[in-house]
């Protein structure tokens, strides 16, 4: 069976990392899997970019041309908006290829237009990485227009100007007449799909993003700290995201707020914070605990060492489709503390592999940090975190689930 994955890039960003892992898990299970991307940096021969120089230039031009158009929308929602306007040269190549299955992933940044997706003639599987597929142009939202339908009279008060979300959603309704088999990485996102006006009748299954648990594994903590020049024999709290604390959805401000509750707690004495995905800012946050900024880690070996160096990983996101940093940390035997929201609650087993605090309750998040520190002294929670990650996220387990879907679609 031959499967071709469509994604904007191969290993840049969280979605791309997940795609590459799905692809790798399938190849390890003897599936002829390839990835087609607009942007590649991996050097992997199984990843292909647009064939001609002209196609590569067009792909870049489209991503720039759409930016002024997006600015007609005035909104305080800071999430990415993708109208997907320009028809791509990918569709002809897709329809003429010998693949049995076309597997769509994150094809924004004008890789595939809304109408392109309906022009694909081969069986399609679509793995989601955010809410864009059933929303308007926005990738995440707290509003519920996606549930009831985008109308002129239900536009949120924080938006004005051209209603890009209404216009994009209407184009999806017009073009996407034939249901596509959807894969959600979490039950939260899967339930959103089922409740959406656009996709509520589409077939859907929940399959987590896989990780190579032979690579993401426990290492000696003191060795990891030595390699990363981190202090030994003190509790370390780890936070990480692309862009670090700059993305409000990732909730770094909520972590800082929760740490204030630990200022006079003897159980948090000598606690220090480690942040990756961001360089040290000009103005440091005002907290009583030292912060070590490790910048953007360009290789998984350093990231694995960082997970192992930490006592606790904190994922204080306001909204999260899955949370790969949480599954990676758990595979390394590091328990995770997060809010009980979105897809993250699929990863953490409360009081077994970490702690799920009440949504956006920073006092409870602080309680979770202390509780997890205490559990780490017994080492049981570390072992449980590792075991659950291997049982639920390893390549073989996830590849089997995808292969079943591919085989079912190829027989239709």
Image (cartoon, rainbow, N blue to C red):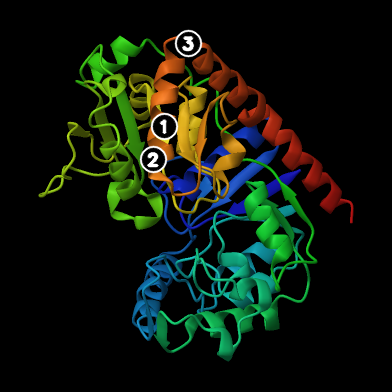
Could you say which quadrant of the image residue 291 lies in? Answer: top left
> Which residue does the image show at 75% across and 34% down from the upper left?
400
> Which residue does the image show at 66% across and 79% down from the upper left?
149
Could you say which quadrant of the image residue 28 lies in? Answer: top right
Residue 246 rendering spot, x and y as whole percentages? 28, 54
Q: Of 287 and 191, which appears nearest the observer?
A: 287
Rounded to the nearest whole Å, what is the CA distance between mark 3 and mark 1? Answer: 19 Å
Q: Please, what secondary structure does the residue beneath circle 3 have?
A: loop
Residue 372 rendering spot, x and y as whole percentages? 44, 23
Residue 343 rendering spot, x and y as whole percentages? 58, 46
Rounded to the nearest whole Å, what is the CA distance between mark 3 and mark 2? Answer: 25 Å
Q: Which residue is mark 2?
A: 363
Whether residue 98 is visible: no
* Residue 23 numbered tag: none
Q: Which residue is mark 3?
A: 379
Q: Of 145 and 397, which appears nearest the observer?
A: 145
Picture layout, residue 355 above or below residue 96:
above
Label 3 CA crowd tier, 10 Å (few <14, some 14–19, many 20+)? few
Q: Earlier in the sequence, mark 3 or mark 1?
A: 1
CB-based contact (under 8 Å), mark 3 and mark 2: no
Residue 91 rendering spot, x and y as whole percentages? 62, 69
> Which residue does the image show at 55% across and 32% down from the upper left?
211
Rounded to the nearest whole Å, what is the CA distance between mark 1 and mark 2? Answer: 6 Å
Which quarter of the image is occupied by the N terminus?
top right
């Amino acid at each position: 069976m031959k499967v071709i994955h469509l994604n904007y890039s191969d290993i840049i960003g969280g979605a791309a990392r997940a795609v590459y892992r799905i692809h790798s898990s399938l190849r390890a299970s003897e599936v002829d899997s390839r990835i087609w991307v607009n942007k590649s940096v991996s050097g992997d021969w199984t990843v292909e970019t647009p064939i001609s120089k002209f196609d590569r230039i067009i792909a870049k031009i489209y991503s720039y041309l759409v930016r002024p158009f997006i600015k007609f929308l005035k909104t305080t929602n800071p999430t990415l908006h993708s109208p997907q306007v320009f028809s791509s040269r990918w569709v002809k190549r897709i329809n003429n290829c010998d693949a049995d299955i076309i597997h769509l992933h994150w094809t924004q940044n004008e890789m595939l237009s809304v109408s392109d997706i309906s022009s694909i003639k081969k069986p399609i599987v679509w793995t989601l990485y955010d809410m864009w597929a059933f929303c308007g142009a926005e990738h995440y939202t707290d509003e519920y227009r996606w549930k009831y339908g985008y109308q002129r009279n239900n536009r949120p008060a924080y938006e004005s100007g051209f209603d890009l979300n209404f216009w994009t959603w209407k184009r999806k309704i017009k073009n996407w007449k034939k249901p596509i088999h959807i894969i959600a990485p979490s039950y939260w996102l899967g339930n959103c799909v089922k409740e959406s006006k656009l996709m509520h009748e589409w077939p859907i299954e929940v399959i987590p993003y896989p990780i190579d648990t032979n690579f993401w594994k426990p290492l000696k903590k003191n060795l990891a700290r030595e390699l990363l020049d981190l202090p030994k024999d003190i509790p370390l709290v780890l936070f990480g995201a692309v862009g670090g604390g700059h993305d409000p959805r990732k909730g770094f401000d909520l972590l800082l707020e929760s740490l204030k509750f630990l200022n006079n707690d003897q159980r948090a004495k000598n606690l220090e914070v480690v942040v990756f995905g961001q360089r040290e800012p000009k103005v440091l946050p005002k907290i009583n605990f030292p912060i070590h900024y490790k910048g953007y880690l360009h290789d998984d070996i350093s990231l694995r060492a960082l997970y192992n160096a930490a006592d606790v990983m904190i994922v204080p996101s306001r909204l999260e489709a899955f949370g790969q940093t949480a599954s990676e940390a758990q595979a390394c035997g590091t328990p995770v503390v997060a809010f009980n929201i979105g897809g993250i609650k699929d990863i953490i087993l409360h009081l077994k592999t970490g702690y799920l605090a009440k949504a956006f309750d920073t006092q409870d998040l602080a309680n979770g940090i202390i509780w997890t520190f205490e559990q780490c002294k017994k080492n049981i929670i570390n072992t449980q975190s590792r075991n659950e990650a291997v049982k639920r996220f390893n390549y073989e387990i996830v590849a089997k689930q995808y292969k079943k879907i591919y085989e079912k679609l190829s027989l239709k």
